[in-house]
Amino acid sequence: MPETRVRVLFDEETIAKRCEELAAEIVAAAPKDLLVVAVLKGSFMFAADLIRALHRVGLQPQVEFMHLSSYRAATVSSGQVTILRDVESAIEGRDVLLIDDILESGRTLVFAKDLLAARGARRVLSTVLLEKPGKRAVHIDADFVGFRCPDMFVVGYGMDIAHSYRQLPFVGVIDTASSAPDLFEPK
Ligand code: IMP
Ligand code: MG
């Protein structure tokens, strides 16, 4: 395999600080009987950090996982969302916090939100680590956003390209000849 380099976009320290801020925003929304639902696979690292930050601000959420797929091996969305693994807990009457990695077209989040609302959630809140502005195919905003992300395919901190790079502790972009440094927007 040719050596590839990943340019850091959001480093560990920046992400950790933002997780604490997000937890403070979330506790201010006064969630009741909170069920956190992490959307797999991409959100696993963000969810692990954010859930511990939620503990530090005094919340006692229950934690569940939902595995959704809108991507195949390519970097372009198929446009269709399928459930690969569903939550097991009852949703009715509860406040749910969906955690996802990236809000892009919005299809994944709309699908998950509608599903949990249809099951009788009292309130479905959502948080995403990254938001790519101007990419929405459906109308939705996340309630709590970590960072706005340049319109590039990012990897790391749980996110992959063809199953690689999820292990990186930071968010970055694959360094290729075509991605010059000045393509990046300042944070
Ligand atoms: P949406 O349904 O178009 O909003 O897509 C959201 C999902 O697409 C995210 O949960 C990610 O799994 C995936 N995705 C979108 N952009 C990227 C990216 O730049 N890198 C890795 N995964 C991405
Ligand atoms: Mg995802």
Image (cartoon, rainbow, N blue to C red):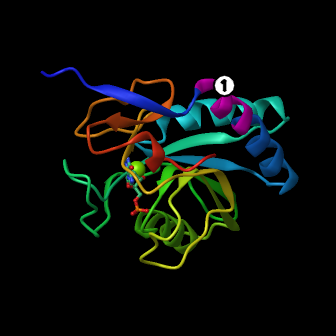
Is residue 16 part of the magenta span, yes or no? yes
Q: How many marks?
A: 1
Q: Is residue 157 visible?
A: no
- Most common SS among magenta residues: helix
- Secondary element at tag 1: helix
Instruction: Write the start and end of the magenta stretch as one range.
Output: 12-18
Front position in the image: 125 or 138: 138
- Where residue 27 appears, as percent x and y from the top left, is 83, 47
Identify the residue shown where x is 26% and y is 59%. 76
Q: Is residue 55 left or right of residue 167?
A: right
Residue 16, relative to residue 115: is it above or below? above
Identify the residue shown where x is 73% and y is 32%. 17
Identify the residue shown where x is 46% and y is 73%. 136
Q: Is residue 79 left or right of residue 90?
A: left
Q: Is residue 152 visible?
A: yes
Q: Is residue 32 left or right of residue 178?
A: right
The answer to which quarter of the image holds residue 174 is: top left
Which amino acid, mark 1?
Glu
List the residue tagged with mark 1: 13
- Where residue 58 appears, as percent x and y from the top left, is 85, 35
Identify the residue shown where x is 43% and y is 24%. 168
